[in-house]
Image (tube, rainbow, N blue to C red):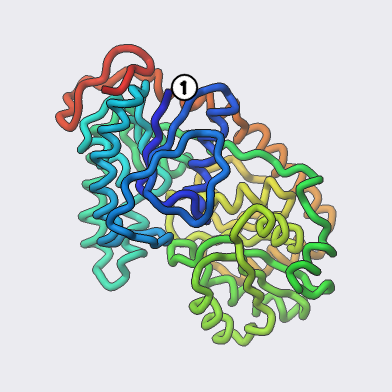
């Protein structure tokens, strides 16, 4: 049995939580026992086939946002004792820590063997959450913490090839398993637009995700304004659970507020509707390292994707989507124009995206990769934060 540790609210609407859920579901479907330890709160009641353990509900922090906070530091401290208790009670074969915070908690709990799964590059992303501080100062604090975790873990994996390269230290790529949606799960475009109260004649570009600064969504209203110069019915659908105020402000700045629609993204039905209602998905990215789960979700639901170069995250997706230059709204608009005007191109992108998912993000691909991570020999250098790893492929935590 594997104990997964994630110092975050669960479940939630963020991509990391969705990726962790996909990994545990794939484990259970492969008849591999897996448990998950998370914060005491989440956005909604989970429907999980795997056991979920929660830290005590104190302090009562209820934030669902990504990024650091004093409240989260207190919750992370509670995770240390709970990790130690669960390791003693469940006797797992290994601990898998998602994100640096979880890895630090597991190291403080002195449990082994410990495998670190990175979902983002902390020293690249953290400065975005602390814009009032000098970027160099934030990175100078974050980079050593990240490097320490990578050195101390018995194995390091990353959810994207580009992230594995950034981490170095023999980090390996761990593909997030993601299944394609069946046709029965997808509503028709007419039905979806009717349910969302969207115009039937609009050409809709979708952004589905949070509005944190690392996403780089600020370029999308600009791209919409450019696209509308040739396609007057073009609209931007922002599906999010974030506060829409910053996006409304940006839409007003570019005088496209009447063509930007905001809808919730609070469950599977909402996700199915916004994807079915759209013509194309825009996937921007401000920071390197992380994997945009929204891109895999659009692939799975048959929606053509236009992604910035950073959003590729080192994946072999050329041909499965249109890739454009980073931070270039003109390129985003031009690519959307191509896809909207060429049904054959849109169809080809859908087909190639589905083939890509089946080949690279299957349950089997994930299982093989995580088995390879567990089977790697322990490093020879000492690990003072916990007991030394035994020699077996996936030794029991203690």
Query: Does residue 353 appear left or right of residue 131 in this picture?
Result: right
Residue 185 place in picture, x, y as percent: 76, 47
Residue found at x 28% / y 43%: 79
Residue found at x 30% / y 12%: 391
Residue 265 place in picture, x, y as percent: 60, 61
Residue occupying the far top of the picture: 392
The residue labelled by disc 1 is 371
Residue occupying the far front of the picture: 57
Q: Is 302 situated above or below 246?
A: above
Picture quadrant of residue 64: bottom left
* Residue 331 seen in this snapshot: no
Picture quadrant of residue 130: bottom left
Residue found at x 23% / y 36%: 107
Query: Does residue 151 appear left or right of residue 373 in this picture?
Result: left
Q: Is 264 situated above or below 92?
A: below
- Number of callouts: 1
Mark 1, residues whose alpha carbon is within 10 Å: few (<14), some, or many (≥20)? few
Quadrant holding the N terminus: top left
Quadrant holding the C terminus: top left
Query: Does residue 347 appear left or right of residue 248 in this picture?
Result: right
Residue found at x 57% / y 31%: 26
Residue 18 place in picture, x, y as percent: 53, 47
371 or 267, which lies in front? 267
Q: Is 131 situated above or below 111?
A: below
Local secondary structure at mark 1: helix
* Residue 195 seen in this snapshot: yes
Residue 307 place in picture, x, y as percent: 60, 56
297 or 83, which lies in front? 83
Query: Does residue 160 appear left or right of residue 185 in this picture?
Result: left
């Amino acid at each position: 049995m594997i104990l997964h540790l994630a110092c975050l609210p669960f479940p939630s609407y963020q991509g990391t939580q969705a990726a962790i859920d996909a990994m545990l579901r794939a484990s259970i479907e492969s008849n591999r026992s897996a448990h998950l330890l998370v914060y005491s709160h989440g956005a909604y009641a989970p429907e999980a086939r795997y056991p979920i353990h929660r830290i005590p509900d104190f302090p009562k922090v209820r934030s669902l946002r990504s990024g650091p906070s004093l409240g989260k530091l207190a919750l992370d401290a509670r995770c240390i004792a709970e990790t130690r208790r669960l390791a003693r009670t469940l006797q797992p074969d290994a601990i898998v820590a998602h994100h640096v915070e979880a890895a630090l908690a597991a190291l403080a709990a002195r449990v082994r063997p410990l495998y670190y799964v990175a979902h983002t590059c902390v020293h690249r992303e953290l400065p975005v959450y602390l814009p009032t501080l000098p970027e160099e100062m934030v990175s100078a604090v974050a980079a050593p913490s990240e490097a320490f975790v990578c050195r101390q873990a018995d194995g390091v994996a990353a959810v994207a090839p580009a992230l594995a390269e950034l981490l170095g230290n023999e980090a390996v790529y761990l593909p997030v398993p993601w299944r394609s949606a069946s046709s029965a799960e997808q509503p028709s475009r007419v039905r979806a637009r009717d349910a969302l109260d969207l115009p039937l004649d609009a050409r809709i570009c979708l952004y589905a995700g949070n509005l944190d600064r690392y996403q780089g969504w600020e370029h999308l209203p600009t791209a919409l304004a450019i696209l509308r110069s040739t396609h007057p019915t073009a609209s931007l659908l922002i599906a999010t659970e974030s506060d829409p105020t910053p996006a409304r402000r940006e839409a007003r700045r570019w005088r496209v507020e009447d063509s930007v629609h905001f809808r919730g993204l609070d469950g599977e039905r909402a996700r199915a509707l916004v994807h079915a209602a759209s013509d194309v998905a825009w996937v921007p990215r401000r920071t390197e390292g992380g994997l945009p789960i929204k891109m895999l979700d659009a692939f799975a639901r048959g929606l053509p994707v236009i992604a910035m170069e950073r959003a590729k995250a080192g994946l072999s997706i050329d041909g499965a989507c249109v890739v454009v230059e980073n931070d270039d709204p003109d390129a985003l608009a031009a690519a959307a124009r191509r896809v909207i005007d060429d049904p054959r191109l849109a169809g080809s992108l859908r087909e190639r995206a589905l083939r890509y998912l089946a080949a690279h993000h299957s349950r089997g691909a994930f299982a093989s990769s995580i088995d390879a991570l567990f089977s790697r020999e322990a490093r020879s250098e000492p690990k003072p934060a916990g007991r030394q790893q035994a020699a077996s492929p996936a030794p029991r935590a203690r």
